[in-house]
Image (cartoon, coloured by chain):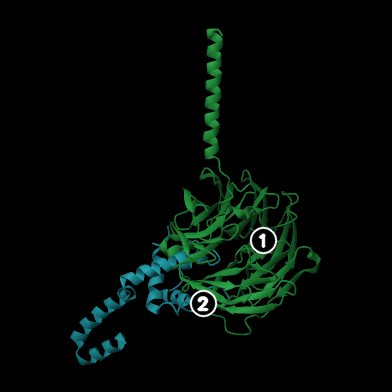
Chain colours: A green, B cyan
């Protein structure tokens, strides 16, 4: 071996060594996002990036504006979160780098959003000016503007690359077919009921249901049979009883299903209503501690967790879905605003706003597994939502 | 109550009652805030930002409920606005807050709103 060949061999070995080192370093840094999520810090305009395997905070992203009532959806690769702020800000954040990728101020006042079935479009529903704006999920460039002339709520994605939403002032449900993103095809349903305040879609993406504030009942649209129009379910559930004051609007987020029963909050009555999903008739009502806000089923449907409106928002109740009994009443602290289950439901994370704390509880034993400090936490969103219709 | 007491005093002794009336009117002007303990005020401010904020926005620029910025409230009297807080607005999601606060507290909240110091 000449000196030159020896030198060349050494260089080659060194290069291989360096490359291997670089790869191993990268492999250690690499991670999936399947156990990750974000927590909205509503008052400080920031979000925490967290992971639910070791229950830790990985980072904090700041500069997202007014996040009261903020919500989020995920890109289909579960790497990016799209966060919808109250001030009309739409922010795309990268969970892996804990940085803002893109941010646009898309309206004066927004309430929520959705991502399309194909993952290419992000839609935002707005109070002011009312309507829905649709953006390219990659660039956040405006793709379509759908004015409604009404506060627009309950926006969800539906199969067929459609968005469905409700018009609060007008009492309508609209379906926007986004097959050609620049030319949405609208189907409108009028007189669905008074003041639809939120909407949800069944996990199979077939039925859209709007909750009504102005009357006792819900409006249901079968997206497989649009020609049949909107039908009413749970009509007159208040039975003429004087409604109680509602100090926080209930939220319909996802569909709380256990077997063939679905669980929804009554409005103005301290009850959770139980509906049979084949007959769409009421099959039970469960008296609760206060006005339910979120009624959330564990992923296995075994238990339903309920939080409540001000001033009873220090309490969470757990309903057994077989017996329809409340089996546990917890008092995590004042200002329980949201709950989120880990993907398979062994734990629940709950934000306790007034304690600046997120509590993680074991859903089987109710034991506290962890506390994470967080500034005025509200919504908690795990990436498992990325693969679910309507979330 | 206080006004009635003042009148009685006026009948008894005019000069003394006059000074008392002056003190009382000054006291009344501040009564909306003077009678509410500091801790309760802090609590009410918190409720205004966080819980009213659920519908009216944390920065009070509106949401499901209208914006509560001082310029929007200009044309309405304090007692009118306090009435809205206490009794709600029928046919809208604005609930009556009377079960949760006194008239003095509602009037004080109107003062806070009109002053604009909650608006960030």
What residue is at 24 percent from the left and 79 percent from the top?
B23
Relative height, residue B40 to residue A177 (above, below): below
Q: Is residue A70 visible?
A: no
Image quadrant containing the N terminus of chain B: bottom left
What residue is at 53 percent from the left and 25 percent from the top?
A17
Q: Is residue A368 left or right of residue B31?
A: right
Residue on which disc 1 sits: A148
Expressed as whole percent of the image width and height from the top left, the position of residue A287 reads 57, 79
What is the tally of numbered marks visible in this picture? Answer: 2
- Tell me the element at label 1: loop
Return the chain for callout 1.
A
Q: Nearer the viewer, residue A82 or B73?
A: A82
Relative height, residue B20 to residue B118 (above, below): below
Q: Which mark is residue B89?
A: none
Expressed as whole percent of the image width and height from the top left, the position of residue A158 reads 71, 58
Residue on which disc 2 sits: A289
Q: Is residue A329 visible?
A: yes
How would you rate the neighbour count of disc 1 (Cα within 10 Å): few for under 14, some for 14-19, many for 20 or more? many
Expressed as whole percent of the image width and height from the top left, the position of residue B95 reads 51, 75
Q: Is residue A234 left or right of residue A352?
A: right
């Amino acid at each position: 071996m000449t000196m030159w060949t020896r030198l060349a061999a050494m260089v080659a070995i060194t290069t291989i060594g360096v490359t291997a080192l670089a790869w191993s370093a990268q492999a250690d840094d690499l991670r999936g996002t399947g156990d990750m999520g974000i927590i909205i810090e509503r008052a400080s305009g920031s979000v925490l990036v967290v992971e639910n395997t070791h229950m830790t905070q990985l980072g904090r992203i700041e500069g997202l504006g007014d996040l009261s009532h903020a919500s989020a959806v995920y890109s289909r690769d579960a790497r990016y979160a799209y966060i919808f702020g109250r001030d009309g800000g739409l922010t795309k954040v990268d969970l892996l780098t804990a940085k803002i990728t893109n941010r646009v101020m898309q309206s004066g006042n927004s309430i929520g959003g959705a991502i399309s079935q194909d993952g290419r479009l992000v839609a935002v529903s707005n109070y002011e000016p009312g309507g829905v704006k649709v953006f390219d999920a990659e660039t956040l460039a405006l793709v379509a503007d759908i004015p409604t002339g009404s506060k627009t709520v309950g926006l969800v994605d539906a199969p067929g690359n459609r968005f469905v939403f409700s018009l609060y002032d007008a009492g309508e449900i609209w379906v926007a077919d986004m097959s050609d993103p620049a030319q949405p095809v609208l189907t409108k349903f009028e007189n669905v009921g008074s003041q639809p305040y939120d909407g949800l879609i069944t996990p199979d993406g077939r039925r859209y249901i709007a909750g009504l504030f102005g009357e006792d009942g819900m409006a249901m649209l079968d997206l497989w049979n649009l020609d049949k129009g909107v039908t009413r379910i749970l009509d007159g559930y208040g039975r003429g009883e004087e409604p109680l004051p509602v100090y926080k609007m209930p939220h319909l987020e996802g569909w709380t299903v256990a077997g063939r029963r679905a669980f929804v909050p009554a409005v103005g009555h301290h009850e959770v209503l139980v509906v049979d999903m084949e007959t769409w008739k009421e099959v039970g009502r469960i008296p609760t501690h206060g006005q339910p806000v979120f009624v959330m089923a564990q992923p296995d449907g075994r238990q339903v967790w309920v939080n409540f409106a001000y001033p009873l928002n220090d309490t969470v109740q757990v309903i057994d879905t077989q017996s329809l009994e409340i089996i546990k009443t917890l008092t995590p602290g004042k200002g329980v605003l949201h709950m989120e289950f880990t993907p398979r439901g062994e734990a629940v994370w709950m934000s306790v706003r007034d304690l600046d704390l997120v509590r993680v509880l074991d859903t089987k034993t109710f034991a506290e597994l962890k506390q994470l400090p967080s500034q005025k936490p509200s919504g908690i969103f795990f990436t498992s939502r990325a693969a679910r219709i309507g979330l | 109550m206080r006004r009635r007491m003042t009148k009685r005093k006026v009948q008894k002794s005019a000069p003394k009652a006059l000074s008392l009336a002056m003190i009382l009117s000054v006291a009344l002007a501040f009564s909306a805030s003077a009678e509410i303990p500091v801790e309760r005020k802090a609590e009410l401010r918190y409720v205004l930002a966080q819980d009213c904020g659920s519908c009216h926005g944390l920065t009070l620029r509106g949401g499901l409920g209208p914006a509560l910025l001082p310029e929007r409230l200009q044309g309405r009297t304090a007692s009118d606005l306090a009435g809205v807080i206490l009794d709600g607005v029928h046919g809208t999601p604005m609930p009556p807050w009377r079960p949760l606060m006194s008239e003095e507290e509602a009037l004080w909240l109107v003062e806070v709103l009109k002053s604009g110091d909650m608006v960030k």
